[in-house]
Image (spheres, coloured by chain):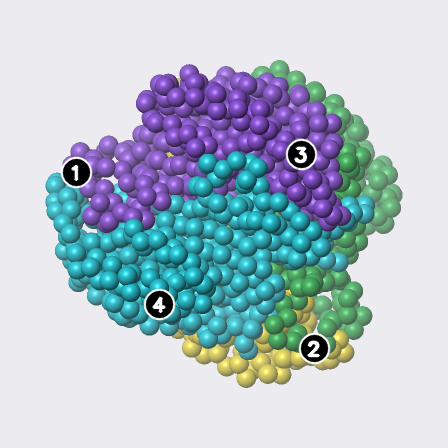
Chain colours: A yellow, B green, C cyan, D purple
């Protein structure tokens, strides 16, 4: 995991800028023999892409994915899979007015200080558009994990600004533009966003993601615990400022007698842990939550400086999401899938087999020389 | 960063078990020429070590560090520095009663399922004792960062169970066993812990850590953002279930007009961002908070299963911290230091120089061919 | 360095198959501010591309490179540079006859056994065509190293089959299709190759590559010595079976009194070492040689087996290089450049500055606290 | 693989200096459940250790290995295994006379230029003594590979200075101090070394190593080919200047019709390839050769410079091997074992199962969705 590459064994190398000719990624380390075509990937990209409702950026990008390599006659070959997504609606002129100033809360300041260069085209590399290739790579991981272990991923928005969104059922998530697991609050959310957009401001959100059917034993102590890698993956999504696993910040005021999930012969009796103990998956559902900050590109004027270090006032026009959290659910699902995919491969490297969540607990210590592998 | 190694360029490989002969780490990639002896490291270990107050485990470990390699005539040579800490008070018999059952909330279940083996000696590798070598490695990073850039690290407990601990001043942190930046609440905290200990239960805590004097430009998009690596480092500490950067989960209900920190010619006007934008450090203080769950090893009986998968009741005796959060502050500081140390080296690899936080913002784009390096 | 990614800090991730729609690579970690366009890269690709003489494969590929990302207004931005090379002359039908049998000496057997799949299209991923993106990435490294340090790379063929090619001068290398540093032997080489081609056979070659103007101090003990990484880089080129540094296998019969290069105040008196001591560059020219095996795809029939494990006879038609060594010189130069580029970045991460080869040897040990960095 | 860490998944981190208190390594990623004690490791260390004949350095080191972690009740736990070897006979005064000058052919010059520091104690980190921990780690890899797949490693000296050593049989290797697979030449070798030692000079050697019973399918294109990783591993051994796989430099003058090993239903008919095709193991024996240069520390005076850059004459006394190649055989075997161990884990991560060398070639393409894994 370094720079633009995510993962140790299922390695996704991301490239491109929001306003260059194309974005994409190279997936190295994918197991061979997985049936794969663009049709397996496009639906996930469609969930994330802009322009699908009035509450998100009106940039019009089909986000059509092409597989350039690594698939032969419909199956992965085990060699690198290059996914390419061409940019079609990059209007760089929209950003002309911000060329010399730094948007408060935006990465254009820190990129400039790091690299000594300014790419004002829609944030360039720092744009949330670069999550699209990760959603594509995540679709590959999801397909393999589902076919092998039945692992599935899902997510929903649980709060938009001040409005908490009670969980009603997963079936609602696809029926509204917010990925809310709720049907009764949608009108309120629509009105809230309409008012916000008119005000020229932006707002934060809270997203919950889960994995079900998770193999037992994923994660490597001391540092590549599954929860540490999930925190890394989710905190790395644009605008995320907080990550929780299981009971999250609620644990501060819990007692040990309350927090520790009791075990029964039929599974765990609760899930404060959020799916792992000591950073290693237990087979319970993995549950994580993230806090997403309000978009920094807003119409409302804010004090800033220009490249000469002089005071300036910044108002950002152009096409921006008033709440980047709205499109974040499929991204968070994809990143969670990439973490688990990588850990499944890492686990079977060292330990051979991958235990299924409901497999009975073995009753005896292994015989001499056994390493738990499949042979 | 993989398994037991932390960092890409300042790489710390941790080894040992809580009840084996020794624990330690190997630091590879340390810059040469740093004046270093055990006396630079021991004070940080002393802040973390057990047995220093009645509120932590009574295990008696001097945690005396030895430097086995990588230092010659008082200076680092640039080759691996091995830090060794011998275990002196490992009473394995204390754990005899938990050999066959799994403690609710404890890693012994997941380790067993992953590795097919059971090491019941004090948690073995999953013990918080393994944070000691990281505190040692962190002391090396802190010394170098302070000498080079004036970067410093500090932390405090901000909540113990239900009790919030108001910030009064950093000068109080060393005066109480809780690392509280407070003098007026200490008696209440002492009484709270005494009652808790008697009840045989445990409790969570919330810790805040900061870095000051941080160079500008640290962090690598897209994945090795400084905040993503901080989340990875802190979530990987034993018992942590949540990580926040800057305003953290508070951003959910913020507006963009409120959240984005305004820039002035003299610096930022606020710090909602917590020290980075787009995952790259801005020179502001880096601020993070973590949630620590209550210890899972408690005296109170809980339902569980044994290795045969049959129901069992678990009560844990032995020497455990009733609140692992109490000793977590120096650990979190060390992990934050290790993240920044690694990123300073990574930054100067690619970009050459490291900008200081208060350096004036350059007013012009670099000339052709310039890459910002030091030459 | 893993799988399809080369380098630790200047990381080149290669993708594509010889007969897919495109091949290419993503370069991550390039320093920002390097002036770069396709015109800087294309000439190196043209040196390697097929179809340039009757002695190499007649496949007609322009190997036109496109930069998809990482360059803005003519300068590298520090973010990933994607190089794309479209395949234009993939005649898969040429390979129809080898679908079910394994060519002796060819990777199609081992790929099939590893991945369980057979991609018969021109070797797919194992084709030497995949060296083209590395030559492209090497051109980026070469440009940066030349601008920063004056480092340059050159190579020549020193033997073709039984014919040794005496070194006459570097100026001859570009004047013949063999990259021979010789003008008097070319007619003999031409005749040799013409006869070989008619015979339906293939032959090996020996190539020498050098770097001049190499910074001092590159290389990391114990494992990432510069010579170890050069061996890795060069042995990884298709068909290479041997690598030598400096005096190479000649050292076996040398005495220490003869081998050790004496030092004078004005530099080394000889270069048996080939440019490094203890795996760390000394500033002398780096010199390496490689042995390249004869192409395995030959017209002459050979005994083999088919996928059912039954005996078969294989004759390979299609368009193949009768001596893959002929096009290997620019590939070897590129790989050597990628190794040094990576090590320059690694060196300045840990040690700060990069010493130039002719810099005077410092006369005194650094003061306390100094780490040799540029500040 | 970086700096002092070898391997991607079976990661060996080496630490220590020849004249510090101890040397050792940390093995991370070892499969759990391997029966392991010091008695499995010590015999390999004894093959390499100094002082065992009059032809090697008279430094007296028992090289007694201690396992500090990662083994519980006689079995590996899957957590890091720390091997510690204390230095007992470090006479630093022997090196006093070389403190200010650089030995021609020795790393003390390049280390000084890289790190800005001089550790004159027996070469410090650049000493061949640091191969001892690798031999220890190799013993762990060898044991696992032998138990799982029957893979075995062996090596012999094939040339000492000008004297070629004909292969008579592996049974002779343990009967002479040279690891010669020969009994009739030993007297000549003894006399040769005695004369050399008296002359104050040193000499090179050539070593051959092999692996038998190698699983099929090991190696990752494009860069982590097994042969590339073997070249990296062997070239990284102290004093190695050349590496060959299979027919090695002999391929230059071979024809394709001669070189390509024919396949039969019962295996390969020859082994010019040296055990791999396209960098992926075929199940044939892996065969490699290395050239080892003469020791640079010799008594004979040579011209050099001192730290001030002034001319100086160097004569090295102290205890040195007149031919470092004599003790290199077990080192090369260990490095080869570490490469294969790592690749077995990498292979099963991506592809699931590991094919055995004599397994019948599958006759049909896998069904849809199959990835060849063990489930």
Residue A355 visible in image? no
Secondary structure of the residue carrying tag 4 is loop
Dot 2 and dot 3 within a common chain: no
Crowdedness of circle 1 by 10 Å Cα count: few (<14), some, many (20+)? some
Q: Is residue A145 above or below residue A319?
A: above
Q: Is residue A297 above or below residue C224?
A: below
Q: Is residue A352 above or below residue C161?
A: above
Image location (x, y in percent) of residue B364: 70, 77
Crowdedness of circle 4 by 10 Å Cα count: few (<14), some, many (20+)? some
Q: For mark 3, what is the residue?
A: D315
Q: Label 4, label 1: how many angstroms apart (C-alpha)?
A: 41 Å
Question: Going 58% across and 57% down the picture, which residue do you hit?
Answer: C214
Q: Chain of mark 1?
A: D
- Front-lying residue, B155 or D67: D67
Between discs 3 and 1, the one toward the N terminus: 1
Q: For mark 2, what is the residue?
A: B364
Q: Label 3, label 1: how many angstroms apart (C-alpha)?
A: 58 Å
Q: Which mark is residue D264?
A: 1
Image side of residue A62 versus residue B356, left or right: left
Dot 4 and dot 2 within a common chain: no
| Eye-nearest disc, 4 or 1 | 4
């Amino acid at each position: 995991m370094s720079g633009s590459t995510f993962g140790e064994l299922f390695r996704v190398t991301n490239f491109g800028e929001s306003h260059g000719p194309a974005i994409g990624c190279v997936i190295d380390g994918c197991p061979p023999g997985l049936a794969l075509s663009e049709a397996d990937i496009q639906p996930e990209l469609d969930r994330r892409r802009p322009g699908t409702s009035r509450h998100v950026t009106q940039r019009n990008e089909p986000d059509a994915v092409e597989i350039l390599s690594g698939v032969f006659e419909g199956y992965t070959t085990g060699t690198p899979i290059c996914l390419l997504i061409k940019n079609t609606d990059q209007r760089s002129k929209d950003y002309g007015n911000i060329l010399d100033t730094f948007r408060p809360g935006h990465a254009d300041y820190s990129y400039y200080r790091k690299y000594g260069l300014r790419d004002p085209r829609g944030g360039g590399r720092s744009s949330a558009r670069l999550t699209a290739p990760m959603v594509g790579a995540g679709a590959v991981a999801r397909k393999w994990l589902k076919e092998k272990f039945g692992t599935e991923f899902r997510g929903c928005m649980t709060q938009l600004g001040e409005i908490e969104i009670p969980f009603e059922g997963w079936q609602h998530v696809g029926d509204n533009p917010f990925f809310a697991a709720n049907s009764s609050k949608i009108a309120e959310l629509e009105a809230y966003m309409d008012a916000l957009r008119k005000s020229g401001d932006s707002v934060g959100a809270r997203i919950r993601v889960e994995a079900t059917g998770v193999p037992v034993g994923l994660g490597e102590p001391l540092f590549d615990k599954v929860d540490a890698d999930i925190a890394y993956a989710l905190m790395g999504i644009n605008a995320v400022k907080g990550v929780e696993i299981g009971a999250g910040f609620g644990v501060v005021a819990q007692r040990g007698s309350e927090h520790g999930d009791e075990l029964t012969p039929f599974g765990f009796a609760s899930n404060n842990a959020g799916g792992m103990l000591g950073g290693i998956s237990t087979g319970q559902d993995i549950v994580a939550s993230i806090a997403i900050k309000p978009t920094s590109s807003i119409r409302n004027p804010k004090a800033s400086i220009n490249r000469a270090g002089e005071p300036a006032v910044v108002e950002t026009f152009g096409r921006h999401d008033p709440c980047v959290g709205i499109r974040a659910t499929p991204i968070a699902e994809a990143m969670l899938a990439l973490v688990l995919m990588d850990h499944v491969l890492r686990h079977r490297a060292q330990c051979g087999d991958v235990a299924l969540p409901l497999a009975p607990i073995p009753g005896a210590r292994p015989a001499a020389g056994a390493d738990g592998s499949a042979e």
